[in-house]
Amino acid sequence: MDWNTWLPLLEATDYTIAREVLLRGVAAIYCTAFLAAFNQFPALLGENGLTPAPEYIARTSSRDKPSLFRWRFTPYSDRLLRIVCVIGMVLSLSVVAGLVQLGPAWTTIPVFLLMWWLYQSIVNIGQYYYGFGWESLLLEVGFVVAFLGTPDGAPPFLVLLFLRWTLFRVEFGAGMIKMRGDKSWRNLTAMNYHHQTQPMPNPVSRWAHQKPQWWHKSETLGSHVIQLVMPWLLFFPQPVASIAAVVIILSQLVLVITGNYAWLNWLTILIAFSAISDSFLYALVGGGWPDWGWEYVAAVLNGEVTVQSPVWWLVLTGVVFIGLCALSWQPLRNLFSPHQLMNASFNRWHLVNAYGAFGAMTHTRREIIIEGTLHTNPSEDNGWQAYEFKGKPGDPFRRPPQVAPYHLRLDWMMWFLALGSPNQPWFRCLLDKILDGDPAIRKLLRHDPFDGQPPVLIRVKIYEYRYATAAERRETGQFWWRTELGVLVPPTG
């Protein structure tokens, strides 16, 4: 059979909507990521940040952490960082607006690869502030969607297939890490705690937590079914793959509604569109039940279908697919390893990573509260006022906000701090900057009780938090109920 006969099988002509959703959606997430870096990176990692990036660059190698900020002619500065973020936002918005899609198929490659490289340059010097799994996921997906092309040609099937493999690793990896981790996932009690102890609750989290036990067991069981079964169906013929993708999307929307996980859930939803065909979407709006695609395959093999894209484009996307598959061996082994890694990269380019979340479930919620005073000899009842963060719980009367897909990095670090040792260098530096009235740090806070005036003294307390019951909320108006556990840092100035 002439090789030109089967070339149309490399084209996913029934996925034009999916391509547009992926291109514009992933670009929008990149814009959000660059915006968060523009607003937060200088205060956290800038020249005068909590853990300055120039010092990190000086003691590490570009071999493991490549970044344009390591180049001799582009050394790190806060000004350059912000320029990089603006360029990234302009590029991403050009895709969201559809301008890039007006060009030939290859136009998406330089745009997305430049966004990928610019954001990777930030992540690779971002230290623990950028150690989240969704950073690597955004980098991987940004690289892959670069080869989806424009409406000038049909979407490449192999690129969409690799995106399904990415979604498989996200979902199945999360499912396996849960089954291997905390026993509460195995005895179906994990969701008894999750909504209350998750890193950053949102306005609906308390309502979800107060559901009955049978509801939480159903949530946990449903999570196992979706994460351990549905990913396999993504590789089935249509409409099975589309149905599996829709189920995954619905599960991710539940997480969006009940929590704040930056762009993780939204990006997962976008990747799931790689398995949803145009005909399936048309069927949802009354266009008739989609077929299984065998008629199209038969037509291709009979020579009745001609290829739409140039051969060089199909060869290029095929080579990229083969290269990414070659990098997939370690992540594949990791999925079935008894020592499974969670949120790990196996190469310095953050391509084909391992993902997963909540392998260990937190059963109680602890919050670190920073307080300051303008008095030299304050009493316990007079003079101490709390610094409030934008996303994490603090004031018991405040309802948690909805902040995702935006990422509040300092708030997340404070959650991790309460789980482990509070004696972290960055936290000591944060306290020093609060004592100095540092304006950059003030911008990362929701409320400075002294309007920029440096406090005379500060102290740090730790509390255990739980949601107020319905009766407690009616009586007091409090959203949270907290119990003081002790003083971490005594009054200091």
Image (cartoon, grey):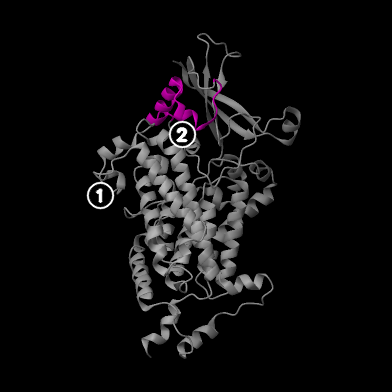
Circles 2 and 1: CB distance less than 8 Å? no
Spot the residue most to the top.
Answer: 377
Residue 188 appears anywhere in the view: no
Q: What range is drawn magenta here?
A: 422-450
Q: Which residue is drawn at 60% across and 26% down?
A: 483
Q: In this view, does 246 lie above or below 341?
A: below
In this rendering, which labeled residue sits more in front, label 2 or label 1?
1
**Amino acid bearing label 2:** Leu
Which mark identifies residue 63? 1
Q: Is residue 380 above or below residue 148?
A: above
Q: Residue 28 at what x, y percent from top left?
A: 51, 53
How many marks the image carries: the answer is 2
Position of the C terminus, as image quadrant, is top left
Marked residue nearer the N-terminal end (2 or 1): 1
Secondary structure state at the residue bearing disc 1: loop
**Amino acid bearing label 1:** Arg
Dividing the picture into quadrants, the one containing residue 196 is top right
Q: Residue at x 46, y 29 (%)?
A: 441
Spot the residue most to the left.
Answer: 72
Q: Residue 358 at what x, y percent from top left?
A: 50, 48
Q: Residue 300 at what x, y percent from top left?
A: 47, 86
Secondary structure state at the residue bearing disc 2: helix
Q: In this view, does 287 lie above or below 401?
A: below
Which of the pair 91/28 is nearer the observer? 91
Using the numbered discs, state the Cα–Cα distance from disc 2 to disc 1 in whole angstroms: 30 Å
Which mark identifies residue 417? 2
Position of the N terminus, as image quadrant, is bottom left
Q: Give left or right: position of 472 versus 50.
A: right
Residue 433 on the magenta span: yes
